Image (cartoon, rainbow, N blue to C red):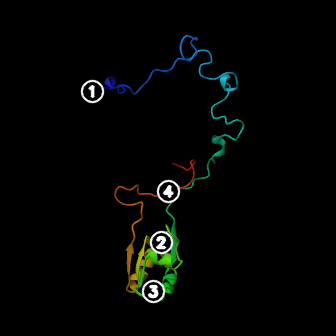
């Protein structure tokens, strides 16, 4: 097969509609533009929005952008885990336990950070953990288990759904 053999599949293309060729067929007289008015006279430039500031001028020019796929974590420090350890029976800290004790809201992701000291042996289940926090938890005799993010994994997008409006950077 050569380049000159390539052509669109049957039914994929249509002929251009030839308008304003007399009243004998469709598209005669006003050629689909209606009667009178600014748009019937072909005087409206592309992108004109009736005097409203056009989209091409509304959008910021060189100011960077907000990543619509950003993953936001709620930070929980070791001192908060230490305070929470006294209230628990089984020393397992998971997102569900943090939600139950008012440290986290539903549908938030947890990242454990290393501020403060930890003496209690804890089994921590979190979406992310800093290296210093992981070292402190394991030094206290605990374990760290990473909870998989809901949008990662097999047959998933690998990133969160887009945040923002229809003008978000895609």
Name the residue beneath numbered marker 2. Answer: 110
Q: Position of residue 101 (x, y in %)?
A: 51, 80
Q: Earlier in the sequence, mark 4 or mark 3?
A: 4
Q: Nearer the viewer, residue 163 or 61?
A: 163
Mark 1 vs 3: CB contact within 8 A:
no
Q: Earlier in the sequence, mark 2 or mark 4?
A: 4
Q: Nearer the viewer, mark 1 or mark 2?
A: 2
Q: CA distance from mark 1 to mark 4?
A: 42 Å
Please indicate whether residue 167 sits to the left or right of residue 100 in the image.
right
Q: Earlier in the sequence, mark 1 or mark 3?
A: 1
Res. 88 mark: 3
Q: Secondary structure at mark 2?
A: strand
Q: Is residue 101 above or below residue 33?
A: below
What residue lies at 50% left-to-right and 69% top-to-bottom?
A: 106
Name the residue beneath numbered marker 1. Answer: 1
Q: Position of residue 164 (x, y in %)?
A: 56, 54
Q: Earlier in the sequence, mark 1 or mark 4?
A: 1
Q: Nearer the viewer, mark 1 or mark 4?
A: 4
Q: CA distance from mark 1 to mark 2?
A: 56 Å
Q: Nearer the viewer, mark 4 or mark 3?
A: 3
Q: Earlier in the sequence, mark 1 or mark 2?
A: 1
Q: CA distance from mark 1 to mark 3?
A: 72 Å
Q: Secondary structure at mark 3?
A: loop
Q: Is residue 32 above or below residue 69?
A: above
Q: CA distance from mark 2 to mark 4?
A: 17 Å
Q: Around disc 1, counting alpha carbons within 10 Å, would you say few (fewer than 14), some (14 to 19), or many (20 or more)? A: few
Q: CA distance from mark 4 to mark 3?
A: 35 Å
Name the residue beneath numbered marker 4. Answer: 69
């Amino acid at each position: 097969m050569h380049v000159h053999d390539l052509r669109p599949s049957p039914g994929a293309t249509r002929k251009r509609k030839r308008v304003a060729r007399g009243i004998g067929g469709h598209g005669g007289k006003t050629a689909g533009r209606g009667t009178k008015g600014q748009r019937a006279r072909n005087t409206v430039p592309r992108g004109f929005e009736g005097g409203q500031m056009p989209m091409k001028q509304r959008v910021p020019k060189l100011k960077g952008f907000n990543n619509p796929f950003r993953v936001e974590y709620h930070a929980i420090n070791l001192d908060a885990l230490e305070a929470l350890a006294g209230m628990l029976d089984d020393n397992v800290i998971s997102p569900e336990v943090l939600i139950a004790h008012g440290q986290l809201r539903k549908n938030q992701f947890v990242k454990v950070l290393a501020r403060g000291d930890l003496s209690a042996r804890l089994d921590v289940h979190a979406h992310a953990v800093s290296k210093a926090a992981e070292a402190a938890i394991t030094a206290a005799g605990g374990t760290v288990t990473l909870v998989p993010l809901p949008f990662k994994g097999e047959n998933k997008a690998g990133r969160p759904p887009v945040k923002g409006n229809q003008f978000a950077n895609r």
